[in-house]
Image (cartoon, rainbow, N blue to C red):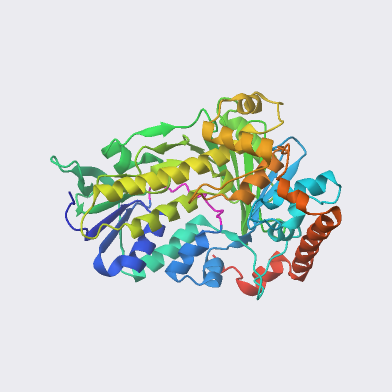
Amino acid sequence: MQSQAVKRVVIAGGGTAGWMAAAAIAKLMGKNLQICLIESDEIATVGVGEATIPPLLTLHKLLGINEAEFMAATQATFKLGIQFENWRDQGLDYIHSFGSTGQDCWAAGFQHFWLKGQQLELAADYGDYCPELLAAKANKFAHLPGRSLNYAFHFDAGLYAKFLRAMAEQHGARRLEGKIARVETCEQTGNITAVQMADGERIAGDLFIDCTGFRALLIEQTLHTGFDDWSHWLPCDSAIAVQTRATREPVPYTRSIAHGAGWQWQIPLQHRVGNGMVYCSKYWSDDQAKAELLANINGDLLTEPRVIKFRTGMRRKHWNKNCVALGLASGFIEPLESTSIHLIQRSIVRLLQMFPLNGISQADIDEFNQQTEHEVLNIRDFIILHYHVTARRDTGFWRYCQNMPIPESLAHRIRLFRETGRVFKVPNELFGENSWTQVMLGQGITPQQYHPIVEQMSKEELNHFLSQIRMQNQRFVAQLPSHHTFLQSYCPAIKV
């Protein structure tokens, strides 16, 4: 049975998740709704989700965001992928880039042709057949007519929330400053009916969106939705974040540098660098992690190092009764592949596609939860892959990761690639065949065979095929200006 019509939307919490939701709902559905976002200046947001992936461009297009204006306002740079350093083993690195590598055929992915080329000593590095990867290594970027790169952004999360807030308020969303003291629920239905502020004001709503971060004030503290803990597969449970002054021109990729009990991120913006260490507290104390981080960054500190505690896992329902959880309130997969903002975006778009204007339907709730869970589980497996498939045995942390039991869904993918070289993308999965191939090759899995269709090519034909792709990519990247030069002409940062 459907509930009453949804006319009042209450968003609890600001930050990236809250203002993304407010801007999207207000811009795309706001004429029919009253939208109120509640946040307190006294409650800090995590604010370290500063690296994104290409699907964000879809949301920006829906919202009519001018890319150059957004990038200037958020001190943004372009991102073509992530460089993983010391993950396969100490001293080894590879790039997981956006876009596609080489040219597939109807029966087999490009990796099969490349594998035979390697056997015949005809093929260069796998990454030489991907324009985004070559551009990242060359520190180049541009929008060129006729051919474009697949890209995303690095940006200042606080400035991004501010940018989206202006859009949301322009389209009628209202911000209420203050803390939520109590949440009211209906005795009959269990639905949330209102939140009461610390000053006594009561904010009633029909649909509530929980963007209260790890506190999960509505979805968990009030509705007791439940949480599936994944820390046995993703054992890191702490992070330290710090910002530094930039000491060189920004590169168009994120750096992920593996250490003894976790990994370090470096995210270059136009005006500064975002740094952090994600680690497991069973192997490192906060002081050890802080010392390791500070010993491996450049530039003057702009902020004090801040410790963030978390638990990897997923809420058992992302939409429960009349409450939808976004961002950290819905669960947390560590930011290794920059998926946090993507999952916020996907849930917002999914909610808009199923928006319960005429009343909340249990069928919509079930479909929303099924789609979200399916997407999150595939991302979870992709992240676990980086930890589990490694040659590192130098510390207890890496020995644990190498030996830990993994989900059967991931074990199957690894076996399939190792034995046959095949990767199949699950419907509606975020990471495609090229992503899985790049990371599995990068982490050290070499397939035992390639698809027999490759044998239809002679050695000369295969050499020509591989050489043409490589030369086309090299010519394309040679045309590009430096990343820094393009930023300065296209979207120079607004002084803050």
Which residue appears at 74% of the width and 57% of the height?
Answer: 129
Overall secondary structure of the magenta section: loop
Percent position of residue 115, x then y: 76, 46
Which residue appears at 71% of the width and 50% of the height?
Answer: 453
Which residue appears at 47% of the width and 68% of the height?
Answer: 61
Q: Is residue 348 left or right of residue 96?
A: left
Residue 94 visible in this rendered orientation of the protein: yes
Q: Is residue 20 above or below residue 194?
A: below
Percent position of residue 386, x then y: 62, 38
Percent position of residue 302, x then y: 59, 51
Front-most of residues 260 and 315: 315
Q: Please tell me how many numbered marks the rendered image carries.
A: 0
Percent position of residue 290, x then y: 61, 36
Front-most of residues 121 and 381: 121
Q: Is residue 327 left or right of residue 30?
A: right
Which residue appears at 68% of the width and 25% of the height?
Answer: 395
Front-most of residues 71 and 128: 128
Residue lying farthest to the front in this orientation:
456
Residue 305 visible in this rendered orientation of the protein: no
Q: Is residue 47 magenta?
A: yes
The segment highlighted magenta reads 42-53
Which of the 4 image quarters holds residue 227? Answer: top left
Q: Is residue 51 magenta?
A: yes
Which of the 4 image quarters holds residue 248? Answer: bottom right
Residue lying farthest to the bottom in this orientation:
145
